Image: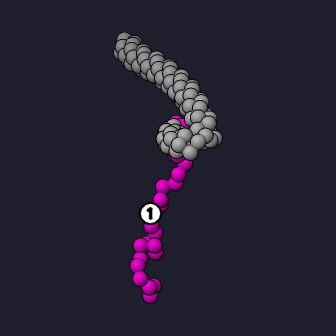
Amino acid sequence: QRGRIEKAKRGRVQGRHKGALAKRRRVAMATAAAAAETQRRMAMVAANQVDTRVEMIAQLDEQIADLDQEMHRLQRGGTAIMMSSNLIKATELAAERKKLADERARLAGEGETRRRREPPTPEQKRRGPKH
């Protein structure tokens, strides 16, 4: 009888252990599925942001091209008085074009490749003659 009691206890302990392992597996699988779904959503968001940036860059390119044409038209000629006002207008357009070009470069990530200055080494910090 004692042997049967011990066997029953071991069976209950093993059953609890198997149940706990099964629960851990279910939790791990659910966590992995949630992580995969989150990654998929983040990839979609990133792709949408890239598409939006590409569209904005294309619009800025068109606006810059339009400003270039207008500036060229204004600089082509006319009387001295017309030239003066046209040059003033062309200068204003050039400033607007610069702003658009800067925004385009920012969206395209062209300004992000600059290297940061590295901190000076101990030799560079030293002032005066070396001894």
Residue at numbered disc 1: 119
81 and 14: which one is in front? 81
Residue sitting at 56 percent across and 31 percent down? 63
Residue 35 lies within the magenta run: no
Count the labels in the image. Answer: 1
| On screen, residue 40 above or below 97 | above
Magenta stretch? Answer: 103-131
Residue 123 lies within the magenta run: yes
Residue sitting at 50 percent across and 24 percent down? 45
Residue sitting at 43 percent across and 17 percent down? 23
Secondary structure at badge 1 equals loop
Residue sitting at 50 percent across and 21 percent down? 41
110 and 103: which one is in front? 103
**Residue 24 point in image, percent of width and height:** 44, 21
| On screen, residue 96 above or below 44 | below
**Residue 89 point in image, percent of width and height:** 50, 39
Residue 1 seen anywhere in this rendered image of the structure: yes
**Residue 48 point in image, percent of width and height:** 53, 24
Amino acid type for the residue under numbered disc 1: Pro
15 and 52: which one is in front? 52
Q: Kindly give the residue lying farthest to the bottom in the view shown.
A: 131
**Residue 25 point in image, percent of width and height:** 47, 20
Residue 101 seen anywhere in this rendered image of the structure: no
Residue 113 is left or right of residue 1, and the answer is: right
Toward which corner of the image does residue 5 lie, by quadrant? top left
35 and 40: which one is in front? 40
Magenta part mainly helix, strand or loop?
loop
